[in-house]
Image: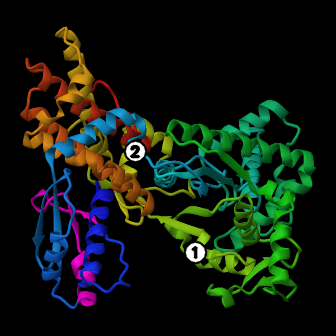
Amino acid sequence: MKDHIEELLSQALLHLRRDGILPKECDVIPQVERTRSPEHGEFASNLAMVLAREARKPPRELAGDIVERLPKSRQVDRVELAGPGFINFFIDPLALSGVVRDILRKNKQYGHAPKRPDHGVTVEFVSANPTGPLHVGHGRGAAYGASLASLLAAAGYAVQREYYVNDNGRQMDILALSVWLRYLELCGEHVSFPNNGYRGDYIYDIARMVRSEEGDKWRHNNLEVTDGLPDDGNGGQAELYVDALIERASQLLGHKGYEAFFNTALGNILGDIEDDLAGFGVHFDHWFSEVGLEESGAIKHAIDRLRENGHLYKKDGAIWFRASELGDEKDRVIIRENGRTTYFASDIAYFLNKLERGFERAIYIFGADHHGYIARLQAAARGLGEDPERLEILLVQFAVLYRDGKKVQMSTRSGNFITLRELREEVSSDAARFFYVMRSHDQHLDFDLDLAKSRSNENPVYYIQYAHARICSVFRNLEQMDLLHNPAIGEATLDQLDASHEINLMRTLSRYPEVIESAARLRAPHIMAHYLHALANDFHAYYNAEQFLVDDENLRNARLNLVLATQKVLQDGLALLGISAPEEM
């Protein structure tokens, strides 16, 4: 309908140019938007205000000229002028009922754009270090990323969902060390645990797995482990101590022993993350290994590209990237004095790898504390000779849990945090997925656990799912009354859907394609969440105001067609957000 109105306005502009009201060279594409209130029609255009200067006329007068030249359309009931020159379009109710026909004919494809294989986009999200279970902070990024990827696919993009596995570097070494030290405890050795180690109970679980497989073969006493090492402490002293412990572990265990702890920890935690996300309805097309990035030569390839483009220099024994000349706040080390590449070198290589795999755009979804990565990676893109517009970083703000009106305190370092699995078990995956995306990703989120668990209309996800369950009950009642739904009769009698609640519901259903497009374009799943709540509200109002299973066969089937169309849109919209559509509640 929106496209149809834009075409009507384009035809009117042709006549305005022919009549000399607009210059012949004036070539503007009309813009049409949904109105905020049905009192102003379904659609409005500010075209007259945009072209008033070109026409040398007051906007409202020009709007009248445009309306006079609009072609007749059976789908438009009337057109009105409003305010300083808005043109409001009121859709004919019979044309509005055509949305029911479209939904039932297109089924799950209603509102979805045709697939465009040339519009490839990779969406990387979660990518939590495999050093422990996912916590509620990761949950918001997971829900947002998965929902956005689904919306982009519905909008026609060829989407790949990717998880970057940070299976290399210092944090993984600290994880392996932590498991070994807990293993020593289980063997009866008492070694002081470092302040910067990982302290969660899951570390003991992994240590038990190693001991069950390896026995006590990697046991060493406290003197062997700590002799000659610096004292543990806070700040830099704690960092020196844990680094020294890592080096000592490597010496005592050798390659084979160290790998036993490292690989068991990585495999266990990564497997748990994948299982946890699957239970949350989040799945990835590709798990990308940082170790694989190095082994493939991709890091060297990216560094060579930067060097060829003249953006590297040597200082204090290290190799630096001239990032400050390309938009970053400072230059960055790419290769350390010891010859090892930095995390940033891996980030640069990973971005280049995405483009060389054929993706038109690389979307990263990071936590809000990664804001510094935006300028850093944009500088890297320029340094590689790539368009930084192909890089898009979306920052997800923090979620704070509240129970009984009080903030739930958490500390990741101490291991005292609520895991994503615990959250799912407490409030359900459906409630968690919805609550995570019902606010814009760039806004802080206060997550009310009590509201998420409640079975009331105040709980938005319950309210939406209840609308779907009510529709299912309508069709169960139909069967119990030995009546049948004849969609063909319903389609032929859609003109009988003229009650106010029916008009409101059809108007909302007609918005669905625009909601998908807008939510994808603006990277805003919360637009879909709000739309589904509005649709559920319109259906509940309809359910409470009208009888569906009436004696009149024509009216009954027409109403059942509308109810079925509503069900299909609710199902599809909930699925895009990773939420189920229960038949009973």
Magenta region, residue range: 32-55
Q: Is residue 48 magenta?
A: yes
Residue nearer the viewer, 405 or 117: 117
Image position of 420 (left or right of 467): right
Say what amino acid the circle numbered 1 marks: Ile
80 lies above or below 166: below
182 lies above or below 6: above
* Image quadrant in which you'd find residue 509: top left
Which residue corresponds to mark 2? 432
3 lies above or below 332: above
Q: What element does badge 1 sit on?
A: helix
Image position of 173 (left or right of 129): right
Residue 17 percent coordinates (x, y): 29, 80
Say what amino acid the circle numbered 2 marks: Ala
**Residue beneath the point at 85% across and 47% down:** 259
Question: Mark 2 against mark 1, which lies toward the viewer?
Answer: 1
**Residue beneath the point at 11% across and 66% down:** 80
179 lies above or below 216: below
Q: CA distance from mark 2 to mark 1?
A: 28 Å
**Residue beneath the point at 28% across and 36% down:** 101
**Residue beneath the point at 79% across and 77% down:** 334
Residue 22 percent coordinates (x, y): 27, 84
Residue nearer the viewer, 16 or 533: 16
Q: Quadrant of the C terminus?
A: top left
Q: Is residue 554 magenta?
A: no
Image disc number at residue 68: none
Residue 399 percent coordinates (x, y): 41, 58
Which residue corresponds to mark 1? 374
Residue 537 seen:
no
